[in-house]
């Protein structure tokens, strides 16, 4: 499984490195969303402002939207030119395909989150305190979001409405992850990371559950797609 996962992740990352879609489209989109949030809730920044209080939530809503774009891009590669049929007949372990695609999208999102954290810190006037909790919750939340997105992404491969079907399925399942990640970041940014450790445990439970479900369900879903 792990060998197959490395093959699939390497394929997807090489395609993204050549196409530069993540750099040229997903990252600018996410930054523009943060700027629009700032314009809608600003212009005041700093302690006491709406932006100061809402930084964590706005950050994770932006990551949620970027995840949809990244997952759609990942599976649009398989939907074109009958690539999904080749993937089914390749003999690769379905769980390995799931892990590989999820790992590739996760790597893209973690890089994006670093950029968004810096941009939101500058735009919203928040100091990035509690770095250990910020990093831990970001990694675990990314795993949870990508696991859900990858599971539902394979469902949407064969659908003519895949651009709208994926968000419709994805957002309700991703809501607990976004909520827990927001609470972790609020505690970290407030300088009280101890208050966020319970939410980090919640994140870990959802991440493990979503990864396990995706690894088991991905094969049958790919066949049906």
Image: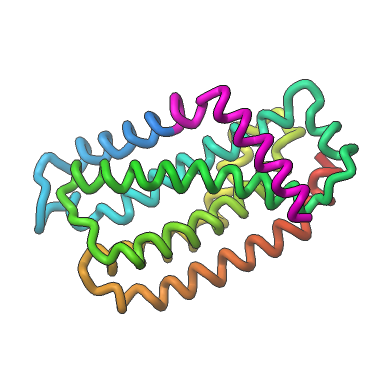
The answer to which image quadrant residue 157 occupies is: top right
Main secondary structure found in the magenta portion: helix
Q: Nearer the viewer, residue 221 or 41?
A: 221
| Image color mode | rainbow
Residue drawn at x 22%, y 40% as measured from the top left: 38
Give yes or no for residue 84 being in the magenta stretch: no
* Residue 213 left/right relative to 192: right
Q: Which residues are magenta?
A: 1-26
Give yes or no for residue 5 being in the magenta stretch: yes
Q: From the image, which quarter does the N terminus lie in? A: bottom right
Q: How many marks?
A: 0
Residue drawn at x 57%, y 30% as measured from the top left: 16
Relative height, residue 121 to residue 83 (above, below): below
The answer to which image quadrant residue 188 occupies is: bottom left
Relative height, residue 18 to residue 50 (above, below): above
Q: From the image, which quarter does the C terminus lie in? A: top right
**Residue 214 picture location, percent across and down:** 70, 57
* Residue 102 left/right relative to 50: right
**Residue 173 picture location, percent across and down:** 57, 57
Residue drawn at x 15%, y 41% as measured from the top left: 42
Relative height, residue 21 to residue 184 (above, below): above
Residue drawn at x 79%, y 48% as measured from the top left: 221
**Residue 133 picture location, percent across and down:** 35, 67
The answer to which image quadrant residue 26 occupies is: top left
Q: Nearer the viewer, residue 36 or 211?
A: 211
**Residue 141 picture location, percent across and down:** 48, 59
């Amino acid at each position: 499984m792990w060998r197959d996962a490395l093959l699939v992740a390497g394929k997807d990352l090489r395609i993204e490195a050549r196409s530069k879609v993540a750099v040229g489209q997903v990252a600018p989109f996410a930054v523009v969303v943060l700027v629009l949030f700032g314009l809608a809730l600003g212009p005041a920044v700093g302690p006491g402002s709406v932006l100061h209080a809402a930084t964590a939530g706005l950050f994770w809503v932006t990551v949620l939207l970027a995840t949809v774009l990244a997952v759609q891009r990942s599976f649009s590669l398989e939907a074109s030119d009958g690539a999904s049929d080749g993937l089914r007949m390749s003999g690769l372990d379905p769980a390995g395909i799931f892990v590989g695609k999820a790992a590739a999208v996760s790597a893209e999102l973690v890089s994006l989150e670093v950029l968004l954290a810096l941009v939101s810190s500058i735009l919203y006037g928040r100091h990035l305190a509690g770095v250990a909790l910020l990093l831990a919750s970001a990694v675990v939340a990314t795993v949870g979001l990508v696991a859900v997105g990858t599971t539902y992404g394979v469902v949407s491969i064969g659908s003519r409405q895949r651009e709208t079907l994926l968000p419709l399925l994805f957002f309700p399942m991703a809501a607990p992850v976004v909520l827990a990640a927001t609470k972790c970041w609020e505690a970290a940014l407030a300088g009280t990371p101890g208050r966020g450790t319970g939410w980090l445990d919640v994140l870990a439970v959802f991440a493990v559950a979503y990864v396990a479900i995706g690894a088991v369900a991905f094969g049958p879903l790919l066949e049906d797609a």
